[in-house]
Image: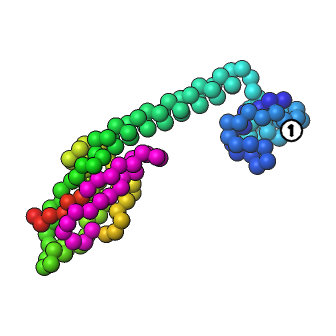
Amino acid sequence: MKVILLSDLKGSGKKDDLIEVSDGYARNYLLPKKLAREATSQALNELNNAKESIKHRIDEEIKKAKEDASKIEGKSIKLMVKSGNEGRIFGSITAKEIAEEIEKTYNILVDKRKIALKNDIKALGSYECNIKLYNGVNAKMTIMVTEG
């Protein structure tokens, strides 16, 4: 009997896999415990539609991430901070402040956890940062820290 798994099943397959199992195993274990459902034409059609929907959503997210990356790739943002002697700033520039400035300047939402700094920004100057917009879609940006 062919069944579609509704959850991961050790030794049999992952969720949404179409597998062939014995009739007894399907009727006495998988179906009553809601671990699988019978692979009817309607169930297979629903499964294919769900997979296509997920693929379409991922394609749209990648397209948007590439557009955003092209908007900010190689650009720079300017942050004004108070500084003490020898160009050292009070505190440090955080990824949250960088994300807020990118949103303000370029109108692009960036998660602060996706901003990678090589080292902490604790002095005036110019710094490179790498922004991960999506899996495999990155953009490099320059952060200019000046006294304000």
Q: Is residue 114 left or right of residue 39?
A: left
Q: Residue at x 46, y 46 (%)?
A: 136
Residue situated in front as seen by the camera: 140 or 49: 140
* Residue bearing mark 1: 25
Q: Residue furthest top?
A: 41
Residue at (18, 69) in percent of width and height: 124
Quadrant of the image for the C terminus? bottom left
Along the viewing direction, whichever of 20 and 84 lies nearer the viewer: 84
- In the image, residue 83 lies at what x, y percent? 14, 72
Q: Nearer the viewer, residue 81 or 126?
A: 126
Residue 69 can be seen, yes or no: yes
Taken as a whole, is the magenta stretch helix, strand or loop? Answer: strand
81 versus 20 height, above or below: below
Q: Farthest residue in the left direction? A: 148
Image quadrant holding the N terminus, namely top right
On the image, the x and y values in percent for residue 19 come to 78, 35
The crowding category of the residue bearing disc 1, from other C-alpha atoms within 10 Å (few below 14, some 14 to 19, many at least 20), is few
Q: Is residue 137 magenta?
A: yes
Above or below 36: residue 114? below
Considering the numbered disc 1 on the image, is that residue within a helix, a strand or a loop?
A: helix
Res. 89 image quadrant: bottom left
Colour mode? rainbow
The stretch in magenta equals 121-142
**Taking the image as drawn, is residue 111 in sight?**
no
Query: Residue visible at 59% across and 25% down?
Result: 49
**Residue found 39% across the figure and 57% down from its top:** 113
